[in-house]
Image (cartoon, rainbow, N blue to C red):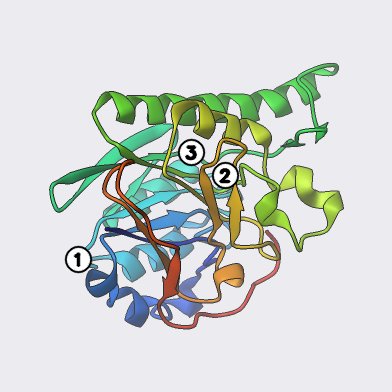
Amino acid sequence: MIRVAAVGDIHMGPDSRGLLRPAFETLPDCADFLLLAGDLTRHGTREEAQAVADEIAGLGVPVIAVLGNHDHQDGRPDEVTAVLRSGGAEVLEGGSTVVRVGGVPVGIAGAKGFCGGFPGRSAGEFGEAEMKAFVRTTRLSADSLRAALDDLAGQGCEVRIALTHFSPVADTLAGEPLEIYPFLGAYQLAEAVDAAGASLAVHGHAHAGTEHGMTSGGVLVRNVAQPVIRRAFAVYHLPESRTAGGGDPQSTGARAYADRGTR
């Protein structure tokens, strides 16, 4: 079995340095790699990114991340990315990476994603230039996610994981106010996942949402926002191929700090 550890929305700053480290140090015993589903910082500053980098440095398992909206707040996502990479994370935005687990290539495609809504209640790429640009951002991010997943399939990765910050489905938003669903994710991400094929889709962002969901094409979706899983990370077990039997997701890790507010 492939053991996938994941968490998002840890919203770290200098004052929280070391809080997750004790749990993260257990990762080699229970997981094959760690996925970070965005909103790793509070305001996207270099100091906050350094706190995250210190938390994940030298863990003994690969760390793969995407950024979230908080990580863009200070207008320096490239700097945040560079600091996270200095701590050993592979940061994806419309790209992919392959992790070998016991000789099995596991492909991870990552993109932040964006908002816009879900079937029947979504924004369209029509009208004012501002609205077109808004929806185009979502479409382009979803297109990049699909291209990354397709690339992994071309490399022979039977096990493929889609990592985003924004949600691809409404299922995992249950518990959030209906009025803000369009700002928590977009259906185009699920279309990309279903079209390219994946074993699992992991996201964050929805602090008051629900952990378990599924795309219309049957891909498992997990909301790993830390306020939802209420642990330092969750671990999900995947079969090593599409023909092997799979297990139900399980969670592990230490209790972590509570929701810090703004998504």
49 up-or-down from 165: above or below: below
Residue toward you, 51 or 66: 66
Residue assigned mark 1: 60
Residue 87 coordinates in the image, percent (x, y):
29, 59
Question: Which of the two residues, 180 or 199, is positioned nearer the viewer here?
Answer: 199
Alpha carbon distance from label 2 to label 3 = 18 Å
Residue for point 57% across, 47% down: 72
Task: Please indicate whether residue 54 sits to the left or right of residue 211 in the image.
Answer: left
For label 2, the residue is: 75
Residue in view at x 80 percent, y 30 percent: 123
Q: Tag 1's secondary structure? A: loop
Q: Is residue 1 left or right of residue 142?
A: left
Local crowd at mark 3 within 10 Å, few (<14), some, or many (≥20)? many
Q: Quadrant of residue 4?
A: bottom left
The crowd level at tag 1 (other Cα within 10 Å; few <14, some 14-19, many 20+) is: some
Q: Using the numbered discs, state the Cα–Cα distance from disc 1 to disc 2 in whole angstroms.
A: 31 Å
Residue 253 screen position, x and y as percent = 40, 78
Along the viewing direction, whichever of 58 and 74 lies nearer the viewer? 58
Residue under the image location 70 percent in, 62 percent down: 262
Dot placed on the residue nearer the N-terminal end, 1 or 2: 1
Q: Is residue 207 above or below residue 147?
A: below
Residue 111 is tagged as: 3
Asked if the residue under mark 3 is in contact with the one under mark 2, i.e. CB atoms within 8 Å, the reply is: no
